[in-house]
Image (cartoon, grey):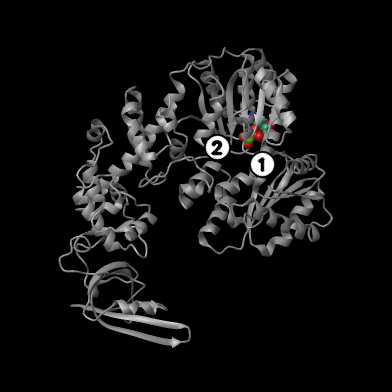
């Protein structure tokens, strides 16, 4: 009898060579094999006769080989045809330049054939999937047949019979779901679900099996997230702030604008959190330019007037500097002491700064990852703010938090995340949303153009805007996730533009490979308006705020995702002048064209995010940067929305039981590895 964790090579018929091939498919144990889920199914219960095959449709049928032909109609082209027939008619299986295929076939062989059918003069199937039909086969024919992610050496038939064998031979399949949940949601047992996800007795059972397994995966994930939330909120008493005192009221009086209704509402939510003993764990989602920074300033003022320090962590040095300056504008006039802690401080300066932080001589520290290093300790940290959170994982957030007793946590993100996604990625946080932009903003005019228009875009738009006193960004194509290559491409674009269209205009160049001091000099020149056109890589994506910049040209726009383009575009349209964004691309890809068109038509970040997620799926959505989620085996958090909502509700009930965390520890460990382990450590 097989155990769940039994190594694959101990299974009958699996030697070292096969085991190595299976390892490439991430299959190492009997359990992995049972969780190697089909990517689709073929209904082979009643196969159609050849005569009834429908044109332009994916069909599966059985037939017998009657002939094998090869022709070379011209140089460089070999056509291999296998002729097959059943009682009702004949068909041709066709391959181009794959002459080796013919060796496999023999006259009289009985086949199962699947593929897209073309009915012209003859019935043809190009590049079909072929299997041998064998008389008393119970896994490959006469049933709903699973089609797995496979490889050239590990084929469908082999996987099917191996999985059948393991399903039959596995005694114990442990049940991770509590009995009451199984009853309440009418779920199949895990064993039944595994049987039917691989070899469904009928379509209804297949659906039930998938529901059960998706539910299980999302439920366990949500349990883990709910435990994180509880772990952070309970067992400790957070800081209980007093209702607003002098600092907050002075800041409110001095603001150069009145808060929008959405800002007021979120500020209210923040205050309630902070005045409660349970530590705040709040996410603020607000589109670019919606005015999140002022909320950070208000929360900091509240922390400081209650005698605590605040820290703000951001992903890049440029952003750290910008936030430092913006916050200083709000807070320094009130006597608040701020400091900047980034990776580029000299050792001496760093030590001095660290000492001041430790002794409580500064109230607010703004910084990059430098903030979570071991040697940073606070006098009394009361509030941790992270901006652009999707670039920091749950862990990094927790690390900074652990530097205080039980500080309040505020996470700000400008990437609007669809609700269902937020439930998962930010399942451990309460969520506030700012939808409304501050008044008086002009909508950015966005155009998707081909490179034929490039010269006109530079001469008629960029140059003219600069001549009337405005500034512009040029964003260079993202070549790949490598700062080196991106930097090179930016240098090229810069050189080309400054030699041609922008010859008489002060331009500067910004990319990730510049030294920190160089970057700073460039940014300062642009902020002061000495530099008119900033040619840059995506380093300008987050946070940069120059209200006089009214044009953005994005080169090679097809290389960016919707959400990212929207984020980039958010750098303009920040002042009182009309702004323009041009997306340059020669891509003919239909999906890309669709993406750029959507962007030209809408400026609602939430809508764009939903579309992006549907177009590209969650992995792409967040780019190759970590999205902070463990891998899921079967659930799809975009498509399985309804199950996600149910599973989350169930998980929250479970997490309310203080004993549950003990019984779930092993299950979470087995399912998600170390992802949640930090909650169990103390
Ligand atoms: P983001 O949410 O992208 O961080 P910011 O906080 O940088 O947005 O705000 C964008 C701009 O809008 C800033 O120049 C800020 O001063 C301004 N702003 C913020 N709130 C308001 C408001 N209620 N009324 C007018 N302008 C505002
Ligand atoms: Mg911001």
Q: Where, by quadrant of the figure, is residue 90 drawn?
A: bottom left
* Mark 1 lies on residue: 442
Give neighbour class at mark 2: few <14, some 14-19, many 20+ (Cα, 10 Å): many
Element on which disc 2 rests: loop
Q: Give left or right: position of 218 versus 348.
A: left
Asked whether 312 or 296 is in front, the reply is 312
> Residue at coordinates 46% horizontally, 38% vertically from top-left?
425
Q: Would the CB of label 2 be found within 8 Å of ligand 2?
A: no
Q: Residue furthest right?
A: 504
**Nearest-to-viewer mark from 2 and 1:** 2
> Residue at coordinates 53% horizontally, 14% vertically from top-left?
240
* Mark 2 lies on residue: 392
Above or below for 305 versus 208: above
What is the x, y in percent for residue 444? 65, 46
Q: Where, by quadrant of the figure, is residue 268 drawn?
A: top right
Asked whether 635 or 52 is in front, the reply is 635
Which corner quadrant holds the C terminus?
top left
Give neighbour class at mark 1: few <14, some 14-19, many 20+ (Cα, 10 Å): few
């Amino acid at each position: 009898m097989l155990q769940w964790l039994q190594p694959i090579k101990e299974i009958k018929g699996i030697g070292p060579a096969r085991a190595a091939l299976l390892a490439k498919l991430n299959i190492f144990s009997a359990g992995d094999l049972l969780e190697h889920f089909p990517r689709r199914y073929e209904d082979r219960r009643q196969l159609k006769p050849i005569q009834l095959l429908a044109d332009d449709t994916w069909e599966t049928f059985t037939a017998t080989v009657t002939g094998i032909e090869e022709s070379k109609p011209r140089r460089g082209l070999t056509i291999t045809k296998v002729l097959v027939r059943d009682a009702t008619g004949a068909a041709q299986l066709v391959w181009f330049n794959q002459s080796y295929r013919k060796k496999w076939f023999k006259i009289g062989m009985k086949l199962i054939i699947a593929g897209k059918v073309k009915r012209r003069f003859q019935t043809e199937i190009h590049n079909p999937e072929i299997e041998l039909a064998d008389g008393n086969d119970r896994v490959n024919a006469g049933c709903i047949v699973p089609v797995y992610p496979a490889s050239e050496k590990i084929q469908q038939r082999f996987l099917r019979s191996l999985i059948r064998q393991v399903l039959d031979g596995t005694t114990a399949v442990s049940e991770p779901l509590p009995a009451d949940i199984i009853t309440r949601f009418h779920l199949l047992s895990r064993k039944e679900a595994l049987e039917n996800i691989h070899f469904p007795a009928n379509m209804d059972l297949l659906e039930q099996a998938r529901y059960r397994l998706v539910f299980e995966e999302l439920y366990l994930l949500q349990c883990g997230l709910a435990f994180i939330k509880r772990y952070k909120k309970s067992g400790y008493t957070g800081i209980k702030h007093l209702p607003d005192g002098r600092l907050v009221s002075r800041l409110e009086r001095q603001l150069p604008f009145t808060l929008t209704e959405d800002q007021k509402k979120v500020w209210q939510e923040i205050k309630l959190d902070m005045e409660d003993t349970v530590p705040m764990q709040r996410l603020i989602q607000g589109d670019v330019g919606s005015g999140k920074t002022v909320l950070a300033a208000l929360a900091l003022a509240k922390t400081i007037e209650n005698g605590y320090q605040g820290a703000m962590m951001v992903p890049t040095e440029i952003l750290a500097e910008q936030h430092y300056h913006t916050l200083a504008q709000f807070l320094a006039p009130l006597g608040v002491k701020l400091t900047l802690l980034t990776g580029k401080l000299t050792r001496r300066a760093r030590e001095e700064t660290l000492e001041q932080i430790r002794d409580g001589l500064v109230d607010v520290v703004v910084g990059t990852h430098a903030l979570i290093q071991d040697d940073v300790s606070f006098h009394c940290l009361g509030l941790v703010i992270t901006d652009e959170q999707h670039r920091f994982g749950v862990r990094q957030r927790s690390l900074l938090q652990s530097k205080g007793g039980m500080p309040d946590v505020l996470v700000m993100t400008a990437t609007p995340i669809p609700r269902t996604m937020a439930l998962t990625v930010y399942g451990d946080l309460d969520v506030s949303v700012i939808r409304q932009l501050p008044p008086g903003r002009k909508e950015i005019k966005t155009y998707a153009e081909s490179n034929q228009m490039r010269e006109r875009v530079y001469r008629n738009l960029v140059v003219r805007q600069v001549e009337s006193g405005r500034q512009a960004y040029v964003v260079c194509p993202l070549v790949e996730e490598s700062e080196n290559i991106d930097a090179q491409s930016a240098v090229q674009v810069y050189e080309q533009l400054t030699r041609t269209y922008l010859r008489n205009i002060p331009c500067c160049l910004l990319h990730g490979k510049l030294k920190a001091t160089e970057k700073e000099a460039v940014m300062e020149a642009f902020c002061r308006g000495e530099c008119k056109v900033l040619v840059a890589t995506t380093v300008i994506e987050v946070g940069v705020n120059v209200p006089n910049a009214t044009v953005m040209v994005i080169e090679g726009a097809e290389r960016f995702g919707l959400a990212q383009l929207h984020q980039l575009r958010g750098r303009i349209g920040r002042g009182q002048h009309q702004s323009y964004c041009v997306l340059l691309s020669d891509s003919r890809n239909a999906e890309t064209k669709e993406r750029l068109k959507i962007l030209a038509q809408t400026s609602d970040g939430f809508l764009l995010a939903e579309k992006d997620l549907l177009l590209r799926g969650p992995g792409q959505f967040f780019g190759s940067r970590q999205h902070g989620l463990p891998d899921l085996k079967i659930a799809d958090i975009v498509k399985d929305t309804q199950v996600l909502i149910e599973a989350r509700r169930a998980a929250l009930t479970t997490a309310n039981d203080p004993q549950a965390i003990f019984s779930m520890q092993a299950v979470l460990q087995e399912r998600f590895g170390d992802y949640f382990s930090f909650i169990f450590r103390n």
